[in-house]
Image (spheres, grey):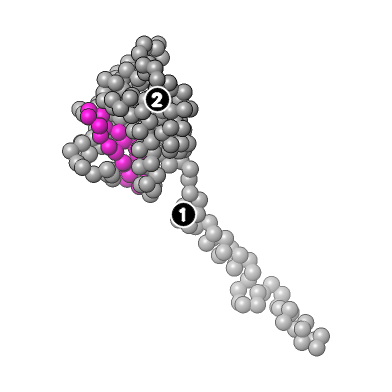
Amino acid sequence: MQRAEARPRQHPEGAAPGGGSGGERAAAAAAGAMDPTRLLFQEPSLYTVKAIFILDNDGRRLLAKYYDDTFPSTKEQKTFERSVFNKTHKTDSEIAFLEGLTIVYKSSIDLFFYVVGSSQENELMLMAVLTCLFDSLNHMLRKNVEKRSLLDNLDGAFLVVDEIVDGGVILESDPQQVIQKVNFRVDDSPLSEQSVAQVFLSRLILSA
């Protein structure tokens, strides 16, 4: 009985029981585990949003935040924004695909709101960001979501964007939480006197 138990454990030196060396099998397993296409789907990224921007009804930039180097220069960003505007401003859809990117958008009076993600991004996540952005600004601007009102409160709008997305990572999707974090007092006239920072930001955006 002891000899029968011991026999299966004895193998020729340097060989594996099923044929081929143990080293070869380990190498094959490691190669499969390191397949980049498998890693792509096994490791989801928190970096969901590539850009957020607001354009007027002529396609001019009013506010923009980019979170990676897909469009590294202002010129490239504005060229992309113009392409997006041309593709979307006459359609009733809420989603578009352009240059390998997923874009969700909506309009209000003379404004167009855009949230951009990768082609593989979850559209519902991007739409949640867009809805939160619009609802937060709607609350901040007392339901007067139009160009002049936005420009008069541009510093507040930047704060809203920063509370929703930071570095491409979605932080918040509840408009009430966003407004509370911005500490915006809805009972007061919203930013009735322009601050130095607001004037600077307004001029910077319009001249970019």
Q: Residue at x 64, y 69 (%)?
A: 22
Q: Residue at x 33, y 24 (%)?
A: 141
Which region is colored magenta? 99-119
Residue identified by numbered label 1: 41
Residue 170: give x, y in percent of width and height: 45, 38
Between discs 1 and 2, the one toward the N terminus: 1
User: Do we see residue 67 in this rendering?
Assistant: no
Per the rendering, the mark at residue 207 is: none
Residue 208: give x, y in percent of width and height: 31, 21
Q: Amino acid at mark 1?
A: Phe
Residue 40 lies left or right of residue 7; in this view the side is left
In this rendering, the answer to whether 13 lies above or below 135 is below
Which residue is nearer to you in this view: 38 or 192? Answer: 192
Q: Main secondary structure of the magenta part?
A: strand
Mark 2 surroundings: few (<14), some (14-19) or many (≥20) residues within 10 A: some
Q: Quadrant of residue 110?
A: top left
